[in-house]
Image (spheres, helix red, strand yellow):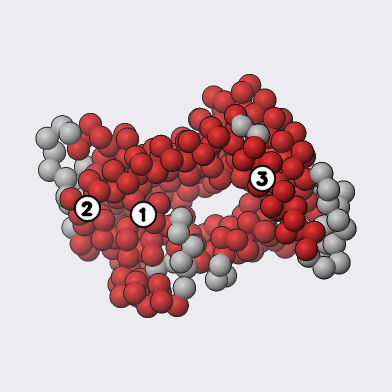
Amino acid sequence: MGLALYVVLPGLVRVVDSWPRLFKLEPWWLLLVVGAEIASFLCAMALLRLVLRCKSWFTVVTAALAGNAVTNTLPGGDAVGASVQFRMLANAGIDTVQAASGLTVSSIIGIAGLFSLPIFALPVIFGGVTVSTGLVHAGELGFIGFILIMALGIVLLTTDNVLLLMGRTIQWLLNKLPRRARTTDLPQRLLDERDLVKADLGQNWWKAILLVAGRIGLDYLSLLAALRATGARPNPSLVLLAYAATAVIALLPLTPGGLGIVEASLSGLLVLANVPSASAVVATLAFRVGSYWLPTIAGGVCWILYRRRFGRLKALTQSS
């Protein structure tokens, strides 16, 4: 993390130093930035609620935002944030296998959606519009990633052997932990939960697609609004390629919440998308205020509200 921050520090400092210019941007476009991000997070919460088969909005929203806040602030935040979210769901009464499978399915669907974005920009790439080599390569990598993640999803949903192997491996690791009750049926519980999730998604597949499209599309709309707030009017398809490439880069757990990585990558890729450098930097900062800083603050508030209702997190038991 330290090495990654050292490499991207100049880009991060450049973006953060542009904060006084936020007050000179069009206020209505900035409101759209925040509003689109709120709607995007609501779509993500609704998708998670769907795959968890949980009716409580309070449980899903507080656990998701608190876990996201941990992801955005701690080293190794992706793993720690997922662990916090998982434990909060389990502490609220959701079965641990149900919580784990729901979080996994939600993550796979979300990643598949991100990798599919360059496909929507292919007509522009092949339509005669001049596109930088960097953005073309980003589109190619995104397409390859989409094929791979879809293949993984199909394998997990249609075959048992891979999931059984994963269950045995996780069970063996859990049973090695001290002071924990021994688990013997985790592989079969994973299969049963997979079948339940598959049945639910089979009935509600259109809801899952709409919610994923809403989460990603509204986040992308937030970036477009941030660019319009600066007065820039770039080609939306080129911005889509820059957004998709940055989102994929942010998946690498190099820094908490992609801090520094996203700022440096997005501002640079927006320049490749023919956005003026000054506008790219300010738009990146405005976008990150809505997608990173405000949700992180909200996550801290959600943690307090959760603790007031459910109390401290309890140790997981075999039955859970």
> Residue 174: which quarter of the image?
bottom right
Disc number lying in front (2 or 3): 3
**300 vs 253, nearest the viewer:** 253
Amino acid at circle 1? Thr
The percent coordinates of residue 70 (x first, y second) are 60, 64
- SS assignment at label 2: helix
- Look at the numbered disc 1 and give the secondary structure of its residue: helix
211 displayed left or right of 265? right
Mark 1 and mark 3 in contact? Answer it, CB < 8 Å: no
Picture quadrant where residue 206 is located: top right
Name the mark nearer the viewer: 1 or 3: 3
Return the residue at label 1: 246
* Residue that numbered label 2 is attached to: 134
| Mark 1: few/some/many CA within 10 Å (<14, 14-19, 20+) | many
Residue plotted at (34% across, 40% down): 143
User: Residue at point 56% right, 45% down?
Assistant: 107
Label 2 or label 3, whichever comes before in sequence order: 2
Q: Determine if residue 283 is in view.
A: yes
Which circle marks residue 165 in the picture?
A: 3
The residue lying at 60 percent from left, 61 percent from top is 79
